[in-house]
Amino acid sequence: MVEQRSNPKQDAFHSFLSRMEKEGRNFTMEEIAEHTGYPLKGTVKAKVSRNEWKNVLVRLGPNEFKAQPISNLSKAEFAQRLSVKDMHEPDVPTRSGKLVEKSVHAALSAIEVYNKPDFKYREESFCILMVNAWELLVKAKILRDNAEKEDSIHKKDHEGRVVVSKWTGNPRTISIGEGLNSLSLDQVLLDHLFALVEFRDNAVHMLNDSPMLKLKVQEVGTASLRNYLELAKDWFNVDLARYNFYLMPMSFFHPHELQSYSINSEPLQHQNLLRYIEGLETQIDGQSDSRFSISLELRTEFVKSKLRYSPDDPNAIPVKIESEEAFRRKYPWRYKEDLLPAMNKAFSDFKVGPKFYALKKQLELDARYSGERHLDWNNPKGQKKRFYSPEIMKEFEKHYGRRK
């Protein structure tokens, strides 16, 4: 590949983004123009609107951005990142882009296999394919961060030489563990992924065939899909909303059926794996400042269904979907008692002021993050109060810096 040469404006852009990355600051298009010499209307706005700088910028809002990790790139490597040809021509796809696509296919295959009604190798296949999806995503991230240099994912010996296969002579690539350890990741996410790898290893080399293990695979797997969605969007701006990205919320083994189940009856290898997962879950229990999870419990409830007629209009037959309990589960946080303390705990630069009020007002329009209910559920004309979902923290995280 011919090395891309940089020019003074690209060099200034590299210096500006490196400084923003180091300071953890967000910035605007006007600041880009001011510090690089690029014309605001003729270049900056045009390239942003065409998404030509997506490999160096992360868009947080209409005119708010943060820098991709680029401070470790040389000026020539940064210029390559800016190359429209490298980013957009369909006949010259980047290697990291190919790996992301393959990663998504592996994750979808894991879901499809798991959700088959009578698949005999369900849990084992899911773990194997999901670890493969994560490994490909991690390698794509490393490639992107290293200007698509393939040797960045090659395994090397103690002297820095590439390790090759003794059969084919092809370069060997790093393992998922080596890839994870080379990235700066949330500790809860790291713990989760190494737990998933343990399930994979147990499936490949032995068995994952006990009721408790099957339940834990579902819980860890559900968390894995949710974590995967977060990272795919953060790292590569991949929108997976068009896929049914979930496991069936129906398990043959429910927690209440296993309350008296003792893991001491399990083989020793199963006991060790289950105790390892339990230790991770206990360790992060109550830590609400991480957006990632070790495992997620699926709860299903069977109730007799009936239509509820509106008391206000005898001619209408609307169905009341949300009950008071469902509302409380979705929006457990109060404003002063829960949301504000969580913001102060999570973010180092958080202040109650115009910026926060503007963001809060905007997010309150989205039912995913906030809802309003009557204080007296049975009095539709009474006073109302607003409540919040912990999911709202993911959106605030785009605008505030997390505490170290």
Image: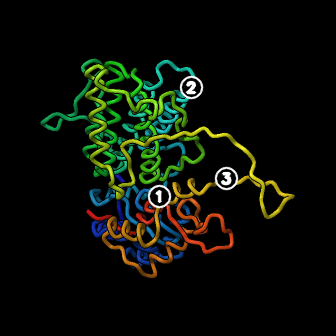
Image quadrant where residue 266 sits: top left
Residue 272 position in % (x across, y down): 25, 28
Query: The residue under label 1 is which amino acid type?
Result: Glu
Q: Nearer the viewer, residue 34 or 126?
A: 126
Q: Which mark is residue 116?
A: 2
What colouring style does the render use?
rainbow
Q: Amino acid at mark 2?
A: Lys
- The residue that disc 3 covers is 321
Local secondary structure at mark 2: loop
Estimate the x, y position of residue 299 in percent, counting from the top left: 50, 41
| Residue nearest the viewer, comparing 380 with 128 | 380
Who comes first in sequence, dot 3 or dot 1? 3
**Which residue lies at the image location 57% right of the left edge and 40% below the top edge?**
301
User: Which circle's residue, 2 or 3, is located before the other in the chain?
Assistant: 2
State whether residue 386 is above or below residue 164: below
Q: Dot 1 corresponds to which residue?
A: 391
Give me the residue at 48% from left, 77% from top.
357
- Ranked by sequence position, the earlier of labels 1 and 2 is 2
Mark 2–mark 3 CB contact (< 8 Å): no
Mark 3 residue type: Ile
How many angstroms separate mark 2 from mark 3 (CA)? 29 Å
Instruction: Give how far apart the Cα atoms at labels 1 and 2 are.
Output: 30 Å
- Residue 366 appears at what percent x and percent y? 58, 64
